[in-house]
Amino acid sequence: MAKKILIVEDESIVRLDVSLMLKEAGYEVIGEANNGEKAIEMLHSLKPDLIIMDIKMPKLNGLKASEIISSKYNIPIVLLTAYSQREFVDKAKNANIFGYLVKPINESNLIPAVEIALKQAENANTYKEKLVELDSKLKSRKVVEKAKGILMDRFQLTEEDAHRKMRKISMDKQVPLDKIAKSILTKYSS
């Protein structure tokens, strides 16, 4: 399935060129906007995989729009600009920017930038998911350890015996160990 891209550029000829290059490379251009405000309005209904956005635009510039988008959506952004000044690069670091292209844009620099941005966004999402999973496991482990401690204190059990007792209840009732631990905490914490 082709990746969906939203183009945000105030110069219609540049927008058309970028759109044609992307379509020729097999991407689906699902929308075009000429300012940051309009891009933000379009996001919810379009759900793009990537946004290609100019920095200097009327109403709401690309840097400010990128910051707003990044605070609400997890969509990678590639910035287009005629400016390569350090201040723009530094400001771009604060948003969900996965690429920065200086105009004039051509297929040989646009397509690799798009491919890399999409892959980096995919990698970032994978890392975020792993982090959430590890955090969940850590919280679960803390609950189990706390419940073991309660059983050890309450029934003068060794750590191994407390864990064995919880595992047996978990297997007998076919309930995850962390749920057994939570019920122990609820029952004996008062």
Image (cartoon, rainbow, N blue to C red):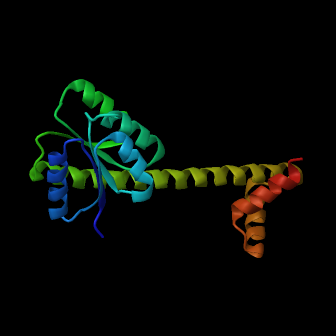
Give the image location of residue 73, x and y in percent: 45, 48
The answer to whether residue 25 shows anywhere in this view is no
Residue at figure coordinates x 73%, y 60% from the top left: 163
Horizontal side of residue 42 vs 176, given as left or right: left
Question: For the point 43% across and 58% down, which residue is it?
Answer: 45
Q: Nearer the viewer, residue 186 or 159?
A: 186
Q: Residue at x 42, y 48 (%)?
A: 41
Total tally of numbered discs in the picture: 0
Apparent side of residue 151 relative to residue 133 in the rendered image (left or right) = right
Which residue is located at x 78 percent, y 69 percent?
169
The percent position of residue 51, horizontal first and vertical second, equals: 31, 49
Tell me: residue 158, above or below residue 165.
above
Quadrant in which residue 55 is drawn: top left
* Quadrant location of the N terminus in the rendered image: bottom left
Q: Position of residue 74 (x, y in %)?
A: 42, 49
For residue 42, say whether it is visible. Answer: yes
Q: Depth check: 89 or 29 in front?
A: 29
Q: Indicate left or right for 143 with 151 as reference.
A: left
64 vs 178, left or right, is left
